[in-house]
Each structure stands twice: as structure tokens, then as C-alpha cells.
Image (tube, rainbow, N blue to C red):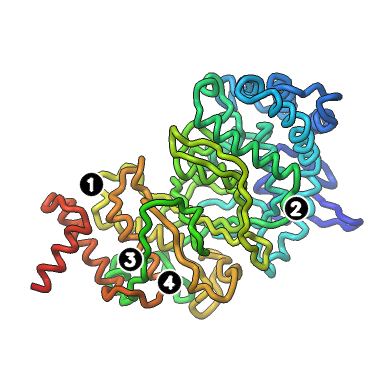
Amino acid sequence: MFFRKLGKAIKMEKREDPRSILKYLPLVAQSPSLAWPRSVEQELQTISKGPDKSMVNSGEALALHITNMRKYLSLNAGDGSPNPLQGYSVFFDKKISREESDKFFGEVVPTLCGLLLQLPSMLETHYQKADHVLDGVASGLRILAPQEAGIVFLSQELIAALLACSFFCLFPEADRRSKHLQSINFEYLFSFPSMSSCTKRENKIRCLLHYFERVCQCMPTGFVSFERKVLPRGHNPHYVSYPDADYWAKSTTPLCSVEIHTSGAIEDQPGEALEVDFADEYIGGLTLSYDTLQEEIRFVINPELIAGMIFLPRMDANEAIEIVGVERFSRYTGYGPSFQYAGDYTDEKDSDSFKRRKTRVIAIDALPNPGSTQYKPEALLREINKAFCGYLHQCKHQAGPPPSSAVESSRRLCMDDHEEKVGVATGNWGCGVFGGDPEVKIMLQWLAVSQVIERIGLQEMKVGELWSKLVEYSAERSSRRTRLGFFSWLTSSLSSTTD
């Protein structure tokens, strides 16, 4: 396979990145470059001319053209949910006003089709530049499989084109689940008859459509990085490996200072921080499905996060995902059934030297429905190491470069020289529908953050001391010798020690 740009041919068959992702894209390898199948290209060209010529002026008409393109791409109806495209008609022809619908079909849909027509050339440019973003570190669009530490660097424009593919339901879905990849098309969001009665799903769609309106009016020019971080199981003196319980018990690192807020959202914290995303093992969770948990809310107000679902399979216990640079486009109110789109949001965060907004989202999956097993030593170790992996940055590396099997690129990507000023904004990680113990989970996160930050806080207790107390409490809780929450137990324990 060859790609051409400005008269120069770049040989691509030696590149693993485009080869790994190609079967998950709706494009074909057509020498000398990637291309849309001819029939799909003709459909996109027709729609891009606007509703006066294409007659795509309703959800029903749009669904018909999407069906045609899916047929040309050999995407069977069985790839998606029952009657998915009927929901386009329900939403655009019944759920929103005629004025809103006319504007969307008159301005947004043609522009999205024009953007999709540029996708092959955008990918060509992307791969030409992919080896030069991080001084030789691979950053091209590719599948980052479990245990494969690495980074993908995408422009906001390329992300917009990829998400347009999702809106038109053009991604092949057949092999995604077998590779532990989430469904990425919007057909589940628009599935019928759920569309007719689900207010929260309607508001998720409104957030996503607002994103498309914004990028069609003015395309962002920044970049977003998606990194799979891995704590290797084997020991190596040159990088941080997966810690054992003894590592935590013997740590003399002081606990860092903590601020507790009883209200507010993680994404609204005023300072620069790692913002925890309460992910399940599949990044994005049910974002493109029926539910509206906090994770899904974050993905629809920052839709560029969804792009990671295209190429990032589920996380293993020793992995985390860090996404830097996403822009926020929407306001919202409520949570779960009360979630509502609340209008436009202007993101005023500064950008770093890589033209990424200074927004860092950390995806770490908690144990689902752990019950009493969450107090067992192995569960405590799993959770603290999961948080540790997510919070870990390699700006303060030990001697020697990190091998490719470690957290690959974070040390190259620090946003400034004042890393100690960056904290962690988190909440009840894994304590909602997952059923975790909120007092235990906040202690585990405190330990992990302190070990990463390695700075003196206001507390006298060290990491190893608090870890030992947490293990002791969990043993008593698991054996039912206590029913106290951790805070009450710890206060009682410390009081008895000083008496």
C-alpha cells in the first residue's frame, strides 16, 4: 500500500498502525491510497450539496441514505440494534422543532458529509506526520491492544471526521466485540422504540449534535492524545512495575494534602488536575447506549473522548488510559434520569506546546459489584494499583529510558515544568452502581496519589502506615468483626493507641 502527498510516495506496508486499524474503518485500500467505496462516495457527495439538491431534509430521508451506504459497505442489519435507523426519523421529525431540524439538515449534515469525503486524505496526512510528533515515538492511529503501552495523537479535525462516521453508522462492527472493542456507531443511541420514551437518551443526543454544530461552524485546530498506560508485572530497575502489598506497607512517603468538596463536578474544578473518569473496563461504558451515568455524561459533553472507543480495547487490571486535550462543548444539569442538555459551553482552558487543551482525563475501572470481597487483600491491591497506574506520570523518571512495555510516553508529554502543581480531581470512584465502599475507595486513592506526588502534606501518617491500617480494617470487615465505616474505625483505632 502507498500513500502520496505533494508528489512524494510513502511506502506503507511496513507500517503496523494503518494495517491494524484498516478493517475497523469504512474505507478500502485502493492503491495508491485509502478511499471510500465508489457508491458510498457518491452518496456523500450528493448529501454534501445540501437538502435542495439531495432532498435529505428529514430524519426519514437521512435514515434511507444511511441504509444505502451501509448496504454498499456490506454492513448487515444484524450488526446493530433492532430498528436503529427508525430512531433518526423519531428524533429529527418528532422530538425537535422544525426550525432545529431544518438548520441541522441545511447546515450541519452537508458539512459533515464534506468532512467525511476528506477522511482518506486526512488519514494520509496523519500517518505522514505520526512519527515526528514525539521524536520517533509511534503516535499513529492504530489498535492499542491490552498490555500494549502506547499513544495515539489525533487532530481535533480528524476526530470530528471519525465521529461523523459514527453518526452515519458507517463503522464495521462485526469483529469489534471479539477484539474487546466497544460498539462505536450511533445506531444504539437512536434505536427504536426506546427513542420514543427515553428523555435522558434524547439529551445525550442533543449534546452530541451540538458538538457537530460547533465543529461545522468553526473547526478546532488543536490535538488530543490517547495513551494506554501499563504497569508491567515483571520487575525492572528502570521503570515502575506493578507493586506488591509489601511495597505499599513499607512506603515512607508522606500523605499529600486533600481538599474535600461536598458539591460540584470533577470537570468544573478550577485548577489543573488529573480528572478521574469512573470507567468500567470498556472505556466510555454505555455512552452510546441507553444509560446516563457520570462517565457517559463526561463523554457527551466532551465528545472527543468517544474517539478513544474506536481503537482502545478494554483495560486489564494493571492498565489505565489517559486522554489529554479534549474540548468541552456543552453544559448540562441533573444526573441519570434527570440529565438534561443545557446549552453551549465555551472551553477556555489553555493549551500546551502540543496544542492540547490542559484537560487530562484518567480512565480507571473499579471492581464491579465487589460486595464483601472488596475487603480482601487481593482486591485492595488491585484497586490501589489501578489508581496508581492512572495517576502515575513519568516526568520524574528513574535512571534509564522506559522500555516500550512500560508507560511509554508520559514523561515526554508533561504540560509544563511545574508538575508538582498538578493534583487529582476525583470522587466516589466505583461507589455508585458498582457498589464500592466510598470510605475505603477514597483512602486507596489518597494512598495512590500520595505515592505518585511524593511531596510533604499536612498529615503525620505515612503511606505505609495508612495502607497497613486499611488492610487491618478490611480484614475485620471481611470477617465481620466490625461494621463500622473506615473513618469511624480508624478514629477509634488511633484513639485506643494513644490512650
Secondary structure under tag 4 reads helix
Secondary structure under tag 2 reads loop
Image quadrant of residue 68? top right
Q: Which mark is residue 418?
A: none
- Whether residue 432 is visible to the viewer of this picture, yes or no, is yes
**Which of pointers 4 and 2 lies earlier in the amino acid sequence?**
2
Where is mark 3, residue-wise? 244
Image quadrant of residue 224? bottom right
Other-residue count near label 4 (Cα within 10 Å), few / some / many at <14 / 14–19 / ≥20: many
Q: Which mark is residue 13?
A: 2
Q: From mark 4 to mark 2, how far is it between C-alphas? A: 43 Å
Instruction: State which mark lies toward you, 3 or 4.
Output: 4
Image quadrant of residue 210? top right
Where is mark 4, residue-wise? 453
Instruction: State which mark lies toward you, 2 or 1.
Output: 1
Q: From mark 4 to mark 1, how far is it between C-alphas? A: 30 Å
Instruction: State which mark lies toward you, 4 or 2.
Output: 4
Q: From mark 2 to mark 1, how far is it between C-alphas? A: 52 Å
Where is mark 1, residue-wise? 372
The amino acid pointed to by label 4 is Ile
**Which of pointers 3 and 1 lies earlier in the amino acid sequence?**
3
Judge from the rendering whether residue 1 lies leftward or rightward of residue 441; answer left or right: right
Q: Position of residue 298 (x, y in %)?
A: 52, 46
The amino acid pointed to by label 2 is Glu
Q: Residue at x 27, y 76 (%)?
A: 460
Q: From mark 3 to mark 2, how far is it between C-alphas? A: 42 Å
Q: From mark 3 to mark 1, how far is it between C-alphas? A: 21 Å
The amino acid pointed to by label 3 is Asp
Please tell me which residue lies in front, 71 or 13.
71
Other-residue count near label 3 (Cα within 10 Å), few / some / many at <14 / 14–19 / ≥20: few
Judge from the rendering whether residue 310 lies leftward or rightward of residue 50; answer left or right: left
